[in-house]
Image (cartoon, rainbow, N blue to C red):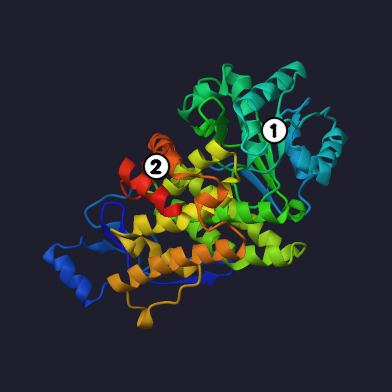
């Protein structure tokens, strides 16, 4: 398996250690030794157990940074968000949420916890799915008018991204679209406490903020270390009030995060474990949450999957599936995870074509059987990558995701515009395979 600068990773299996995954790599066999001797492959360097991340013998380890907030995880942990806000100095926190969450009652419960801790929260719920630039501006005006000091968000990715956008404007002013790109903010922003109510977006631990630019009908990506929340409180009980369509969409989003983070050009040993863990947990538990929505065990596993995927992608970034999905979502204002579910199998095949080996652990995490006798081969890698693409589509079918983009309103006339916007998306820069505009157009057409 080629990783980074051409190092060799030979995968035996992906096995469990408790609830963790261990990716085992076998020692080089005679055929590999011959390739090393001929110069076809660099000599691998392994630890004494023959597993873990592998670097090529002639290349020093790549510098890795890992951004992460304080995390509180567990059923019944909602009240911890109030304690976290108090520790961050909140007196007049802005509680960001949406109408669906208000109907479920979670913001009211969190509001009581905030008041019990001596704070006077102000509630703002003016955000819709795929948060819009004008909604962020309105939320910022509310923040200023109420003289708020800390952002507390309870909701899905749209709510959390809206809270990040409000915090960004509170510290820097201007319009949210001014900050498209990487590290465009200059001044500090208010503290943020996030409580995710869906199992997939990972926004509660990420350095991303995704906002819809309504003038261009596209989603913009804002990326920066300052956008990593101070505290994430993950209470799996909140997941039980998700409608089925949202459960499916966010679960597929978590799967896409895990897969794209694992093969990203920016992946590293710290992100790989989280990515594979997320893939395995989604594959093992998402369907069960659809069939048994009140079962606590599967909800806990999916909450963990979303968290692990978020930790992976915020540090390894993403790839072509997300770069393309952002454009479709901005154009048609549709659920992001559903679009990912349509695009991901096509992107997996595209990325695996020149080097399928990186997809072997992904396929194994999804249930692909080990090679006979633990032997790795090019043919096995090709089989595994194709199996992974088929398994993603099977899961999407089970969850009721449309077969193609045409079923959700994308037409042939949209392809050129979507491809043009995709080429400017920050997520495309870490896709493992170089993608030209023609490549992206072809992927969109395949997905129609």
Task: Tell me if label 1 and label 2 are in contact, CB under 8 Å.
Answer: no
How many marks do you count on the picture? 2
Which one is in front, 103 or 274?
A: 103
> Residue sitting at 62 percent across and 31 percent down?
164
Tell me if 374 is positioned left or right of 151 in this view. left
Which one is in front, 156 or 396?
A: 396
Q: Residues within 10 Å of mark 1 (few under 14, many from 20)?
A: many
Can residue 112 be seen here? yes
> Residue sitting at 63 percent across and 62 percent down?
286
**Given the current orientation, which residue lies at the most extreme bottom position?**
373
* Residue highlighted by disc 2: 428
Q: What element carries label 2?
A: helix
Ranked by sequence position, the earlier of labels 1 and 2 is 1
Tell me if 374 is positioned left or right of 187 in this view. left
Q: Which mark is residue 208?
A: none
Q: Position of residue 268 (x, y in %)?
A: 40, 51
Q: Where is residue 97 in the image (x, y as percent from the top left)?
A: 74, 36
Quadrant of residue 291 in the image? bottom right
Q: Where is residue 330 in the image (x, y as percent from the top left)?
A: 54, 36
Q: Position of residue 338 (x, y in %)?
A: 57, 51
Q: Is residue 298 above or below residue 239?
A: below
- Between the residue at mark 1 and the residue at mark 2, the CA separation in whole angstroms equals 27 Å
- Quadrant of image for the N terminus: bottom left
Q: Is mark 1 on a helix, strand or loop?
A: loop
Q: Residue 127 carries which label?
A: 1
Quadrant of residue 363 in the image? bottom left
Q: Residues within 10 Å of mark 2 (few under 14, many from 20)?
A: many
Can residue 185 be seen here? no
Quadrant of residue 13 in the image? bottom left
């Amino acid at each position: 398996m080629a990783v980074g600068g051409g190092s060799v990773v030979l995968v035996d299996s992906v096995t469990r250690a408790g609830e963790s995954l261990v990716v085992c790599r076998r020692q080089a066999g005679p055929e590999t030794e011959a390739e090393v001797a001929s110069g076809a492959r660099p000599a691998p360097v392994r630890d004494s157990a023959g597993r873990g991340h592998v670097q090529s013998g002639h290349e020093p380890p790549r510098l890795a940074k890992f951004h992460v907030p304080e995390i509180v995880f567990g059923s019944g942990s909602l009240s911890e968000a109030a304690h976290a806000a108090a520790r961050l100095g909140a007196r007049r926190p802005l509680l960001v949420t949406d109408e669906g969450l208000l109907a479920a009652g979670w913001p009211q419960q969190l509001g009581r916890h905030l008041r019990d801790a001596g704070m006077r929260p102000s509630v703002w719920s003016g955000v819709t799915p795929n948060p819009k630039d004008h909604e962020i501006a309105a939320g910022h005006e509310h923040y200023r008018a109420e003289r708020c000091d800390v952002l507390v968000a309870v909701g899905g990715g749209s709510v959390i991204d809206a809270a990040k956008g409000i915090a960004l404007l509170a510290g820097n002013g201007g319009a949210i679209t001014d900050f498209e790109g990487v590290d465009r903010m200059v001044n500090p922003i208010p503290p943020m406490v996030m409580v995710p109510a869906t199992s997939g977006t990972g926004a509660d631990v990420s350095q991303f903020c995704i906002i819809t630019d309504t003038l261009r009908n596209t989603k913009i990506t804002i990326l920066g270390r300052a956008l990593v929340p101070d505290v994430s409180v993950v209470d799996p009980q909140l997941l039980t009030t998700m409608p089925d369509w949202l459960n499916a969409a966010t679960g597929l989003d978590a799967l896409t995060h895990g897969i794209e983070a694992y093969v990203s050009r920016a992946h590293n040993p710290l992100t790989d474990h989280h990515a594979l863990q997320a893939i395995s947990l989604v594959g093992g538990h998402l369907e069960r949450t659809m069939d048994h929505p009140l079962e606590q065990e599967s909800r806990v596993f999916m909450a963990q999957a979303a968290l692990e995927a978020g930790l992976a992608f915020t540090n390894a970034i993403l790839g072509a599936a997300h770069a393309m999905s952002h454009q479709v979502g901005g154009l048609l204002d549709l659920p992001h995870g559903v679009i990912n579910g349509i695009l991901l199998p096509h992107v997996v095949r595209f990325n695996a074509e020149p080097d399928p080996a990186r997809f072997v652990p992904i396929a194994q995490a999804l249930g692909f059987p080990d090679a006979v006798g633990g032997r790795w081969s090019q043919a096995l890698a090709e089989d595994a990558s194709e199996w992974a693409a088929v398994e993603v589509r099977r899961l999407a079918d089970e969850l009721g995701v449309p077969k193609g983009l045409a079923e959700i309103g994308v037409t042939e006339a949209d392809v050129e515009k979507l491809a043009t916007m995709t080429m400017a998306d920050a997520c495309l820069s870490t896709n493992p395979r170089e993608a030209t505009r023609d490549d992206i157009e072809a992927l969109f057409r395949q997905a129609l």
